[in-house]
């Protein structure tokens, strides 16, 4: 006997209503007619059941989907971050290998040019300082940070702001550091 | 020229350190300090706008501040892309002197720096040149010929620049009266002899820490530089062999008690080789092949053509870089040769060049040359001049107090007997000292 009802267009097993198995002799009492006892009178009852199951499925799927989306987003973000880290590292290494006659000092801005030969080099002279006599093509300006990374000139303000915020945090953290052994987030919450 | 930079240097935060170094140098540059004392009150360089192009070092800082103390307005660039001491430049920039120099310029930046010193604030052009090597002189002659008329004179520090001046004069290109500071007695006779006498050993010791006592040192050339080197090496207890081409110098060396022979002979004996000739091809492949194991070879003469580095680099079995400026070559015969500063000037490559005191001599000549050209302009038509002997003597005199020297005065009758003025000049121009 087929006791399962499928809703139209729902092909997955999850969308069939599974009824509890029948027993022709429940609690040792022989039923007179299992058919009679078990027959589904109103077909809509089954539909309602099926709908209910389906709704559960959908909710769970949506729920899982939500949670997975967060993770997917995080993966995508981390991948993006990883790519950026690798790109930045490559760019920084590249910049460190550009020809340069001066000993570079963190905190200073350096200007990258290309010679006619194709050689790229760092100068402490900006194109503005060169004026019209600037002999080589200007590629960009970079600030050398204290961790020996390079910040392109357009990001310098942003980066400086970040650093100053962190500095403030570090300062207030260390000054507010209690004698207790527990962590202190005092500086972070402000 | 609309928005001229007040200065361009590597790092202004080094100014304090630079000032400390300048304070110490002042004490070791009594000539310059004496000139400040003598000429400070009369301000002989008032209205002079001096563009200077000379190694921007601590010693030069004392020169710059002396020129300012005598009333001049000064702008500065360095005459070498690597010689600037950034802390000295910072200290000078901090006093408001427009200085354009940093260690490690590119060639293009080097010219840019020089060009920044041509026009002073308010667009006034330079009216005096103080040069070392001739680049500023050439730049003004080639790119700013209109300004030449307003320039009263130039003083040139070094051999290379003086050669350039004579060349320009011969071709009729020189348009400014020039004083050759290089050949003042108190310059060449002092920094070549006494400067190298100290800095040669300094360079060898810093590079190798070798014991000099007991070694055989071979010095090629017995000119002023050679004499200084020989004295220093002997002072440390080396046995010194000299090579010479000039019979007069060779005789001098022999009569000082040195063995004089050829490099072909000496190369078999020496442990330390020093070239001081100013000539080329002094130590060649065949000499290297004869040398003892780990012979030290260096040059303090002229640029880098005295030692055949090309032969070494092409024929050595192996080259090992021990540290910057020190290379140990393994020859095919199994012996080693240690070359300092890649055959370039060892006192610059491996030590600190000339000490302040000897630079005080040179720079006092520069100051007096500037005063002479600025105040006695009519005496000098276009040409290349020596500093008058009287001023040469004045440079030396300015250094005596500091050393506690007591000078004897000629009496009138002694002066009459010699036929010279009581106050000098004491020697005829051809006197050789």
Image: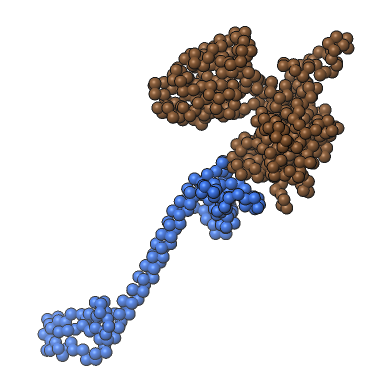
Q: Is residue B187 above or below residue B153?
A: above
Say how many tags the image has: 0
Quarter occupied by residue B57: top right
Quarter occupied by residue B31: top right
- Looking at the image, which is closer to me, A12 or A142? A142
Q: Is residue A166 above or below residue B263?
A: below
Q: Position of residue B155 (x, y in %)?
A: 74, 32
The scheme the figure's colours follow is by chain
Q: Is residue A78 above or below residue B14?
A: below
Q: Is residue B249 above or below residue A164?
A: above
Res B211 visible: no
In the image, taking residue B375 as reference, residue B296 lies left or right, namely left
Which quadrant is home to the N terminus of chain A? bottom left
- Looking at the image, which is closer to me, B273 or B208? B273
User: Which chain is brown in the picture?
Assistant: B
Q: Colour of chain A?
A: blue
| Residue lying at 14% horizontally and 87% vertically, measured from the top left | A34
Q: Position of residue B316 (x, y in %)?
A: 42, 27
Which quadrant is home to the C terminus of chain A? bottom right
Q: Position of residue B354 (x, y in %)?
A: 64, 26
| Residue lying at 49% horizontally and 16% vertically, measured from the top left | B264
In the image, taking residue B1 as reference, residue B268 lies left or right, namely left
Res B255 visible: yes
| Residue lying at 45% horizontally and 57% vertically, measured from the top left | A84
Q: Position of residue B359 (x, y in %)?
A: 69, 27
- Looking at the image, which is closer to me, B194 or B25? B194
| Residue lying at 52% horizontally and 12% vertically, measured from the top left | B214
- Looking at the image, which is closer to me, B114 or A183? B114
Q: Residue furthest right?
A: B412
């Amino acid at each position: 006997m087929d006791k399962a009802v499928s809703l139209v267009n729902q092909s997955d097993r999850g969308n069939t209503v599974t009824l509890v198995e029948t027993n022709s002799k429940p609690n040792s009492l022989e039923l007179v007619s299992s058919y009679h006892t078990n027959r589904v009178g109103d077909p809509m009852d089954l539909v309602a059941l099926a709908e209910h199951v389906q709704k559960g499925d959908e909710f769970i799927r949506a729920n899982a989907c939500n949670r997975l989306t967060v993770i997917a987003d995080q993966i995508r973000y981390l991948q993006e971050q990883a790519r950026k880290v690798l790109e930045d590292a490559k760019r920084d290494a590249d910049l460190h290998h550009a020809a340069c006659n001066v000993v570079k000092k963190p905190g200073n801005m350096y200007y990258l040019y290309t010679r006619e030969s194709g050689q790229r080099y760092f100068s402490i002279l900006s194109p503005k300082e060169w004026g019209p006599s600037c002999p080589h093509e200007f590629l960009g300006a970079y600030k050398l940070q204290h961790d020996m990374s390079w910040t392109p000139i357009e990001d310098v303000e942003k980066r400086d702001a970040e650093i100053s915020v962190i500095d403030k945090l570090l300062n207030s953290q260390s000054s507010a550091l209690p004698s207790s052994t527990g962590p202190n987030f005092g500086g972070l919450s402000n | 020229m609309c928005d001229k930079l007040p200065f361009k240097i590597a790092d202004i935060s080094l100014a304090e350190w630079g000032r400390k170094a300048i304070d110490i140098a002042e004490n070791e540059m009594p000539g310059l300090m004496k000139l400040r004392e003598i000429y400070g009150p009369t301000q002989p360089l008032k209205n002079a706008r001096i563009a200077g192009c000379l190694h921007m070092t601590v010693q030069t800082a004392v020169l710059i501040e002396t020129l300012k103390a005598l009333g001049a307005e000064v702008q500065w660039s360095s005459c070498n892309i690597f010689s600037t001491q950034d802390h000295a430049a910072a200290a000078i920039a901090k006093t408001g002197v427009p200085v354009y120099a940093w260690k490690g310029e590119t060639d293009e930046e080097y010219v840019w720096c020089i060009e920044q010193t041509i026009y002073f604030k308010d667009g006034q052009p330079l009216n005096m040149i103080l040069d070392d090597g001739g680049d500023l002189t050439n730049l003004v002659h080639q790119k700013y010929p209109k300004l030449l008329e307003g320039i009263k004179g130039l003083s040139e520090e070094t051999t290379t620049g003086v050669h350039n001046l004579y060349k320009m004069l011969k071709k009729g290109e020189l348009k400014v009266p020039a004083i050759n500071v290089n050949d003042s007695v108190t310059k060449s006779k002092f920094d070549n002899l006494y400067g190298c006498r100290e800095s040669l050993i300094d360079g060898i010791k810093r590079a190798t820490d070798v014991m000099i006592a007991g070694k055989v040192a071979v010095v090629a050339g017995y000119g002023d530089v050679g004499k200084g080197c020989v004295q220093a090496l002997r002072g440390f207890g080396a046995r010194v062999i000299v090579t010479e081409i000039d019979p007069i110098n060779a005789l001098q060396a022999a009569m000082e008690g040195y063995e004089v022979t050829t490099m072909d002979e000496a190369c078999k004996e020496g442990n330390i080789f020093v070239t001081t000739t100013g000539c080329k091809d002094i130590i060649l492949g065949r000499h290297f092949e004869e040398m003892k194991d780990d012979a030290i070879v260096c040059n303090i003469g002229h640029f880098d053509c005295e030692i055949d580095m090309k032969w070494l680099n092409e024929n050595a079995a192996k080259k090992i870089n021990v540290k910057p400026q020190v290379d140990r070559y393994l020859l095919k015969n199994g012996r080693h040769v240690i070359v300092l500063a890649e055959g370039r000037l060892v006192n610059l490559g491996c030590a600190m060049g000339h000490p302040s005191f000897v630079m005080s001599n040179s720079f006092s000549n520069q100051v007096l040359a500037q005063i002479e050209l600025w105040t006695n302009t009519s005496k000098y038509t276009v040409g290349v001049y020596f500093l008058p002997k009287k001023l040469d003597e004045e440079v030396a005199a300015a250094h005596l107090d500091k050393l506690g020297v007591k000078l004897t005065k000629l009496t009138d009758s002694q002066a009459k007997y010699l036929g010279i003025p009581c106050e000098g000049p004491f020697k005829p121009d051809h006197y050789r000292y």
